Amino acid sequence: MRTWLLLTLLLVGLAGCAVFPPVPEDQLAARTAFLERAAELEAVGHWRFVGRLTLELPTESWSGQLNWRTEGLRQVIDLSGPMGRGGGRLMLGGQRAVLITREGDRYEAADADELIALVTGRGIPVGGLDYWVRGMPRPGVGFDLRADVDGQPRRLIQDGWEIVYGVFEEAAPVAMPMSVELHREDMRLRLMIQRWQLTQVDAS
């Protein structure tokens, strides 16, 4: 299995409105701030970031450059390895999830989870990644969250993944994570973000 291909397929997400479970008493203030941050993010219609990714498995690893851009429900994710090798383009938000590799191979499925199962043979839930990279839980699924007093998540557990956040930086209108590390079973995904670009929805 090409490790970069698994990495490309991991970088997917679905849109919706977040649902939050009951909160431990010692996290009430932090969760209130977290919800305020989430509300600000909901006003962001378009977002984009570039960064570097590393995927580690027990027998192999892969790293590459990432350019992830979205406008509403449409998402385009470009991934390339050293010297432009490997990687491909993943397109979401239409009627089908589509992956086109740099070698010209094309894969299609009904959604991202089905696509990763088709290409890699691994049933890995990935539908929350576009939320997790922004520091939010996937809608409609239980999760465990620890946030700080500014509402910035520090640790999130959902869909069998443990997501740990590092430093946040202002991206206007809200601070965004600059480092994210995801663990699930024997898999580790590290993301170091170089810059975010956020555009708020015009309310007029």
Image (cartoon, rainbow, N blue to C red):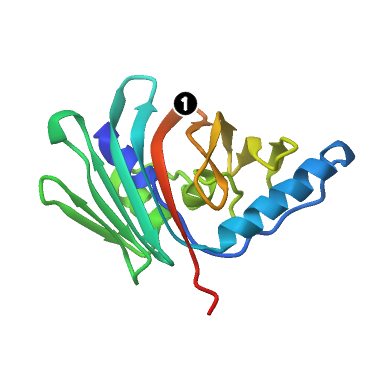
* Residue sitting at x 64%, y 54%: 38
Q: Which one is nearer the viewer's eye here, 49 or 184?
A: 49
Residue 141 visible? The answer is no
- Toward the bottom, the furthest residue is 204
Q: Quadrant of residue 40?
A: bottom right
Q: Left or right: where does residue 55 sit relative to residue 104?
A: right
* Residue sitting at x 45%, y 29%: 187
Q: Circle 1 — which element?
A: loop
Disc 1 target residue: 186
- Toward the right, the furthest residue is 25
How crowded pointer 1 is (Cα within 10 Å; few <14, some 14-19, many 20+) is rated as: few
The image shows residue 46, relative to residue 192, as above or below, that is: below
* Residue sitting at x 82%, y 50%: 22
Kind of residue indicated by mark 1: Asp
The image shows residue 68, relative to residue 43, as above or below, that is: above
Q: Quadrant of the N terminus?
A: top left
Residue 160 at x, y percent in the picture: 58, 39
Q: Which one is nearer the viewer's eye here, 39 or 93?
A: 39
Residue 65 at x, y percent in the picture: 28, 35
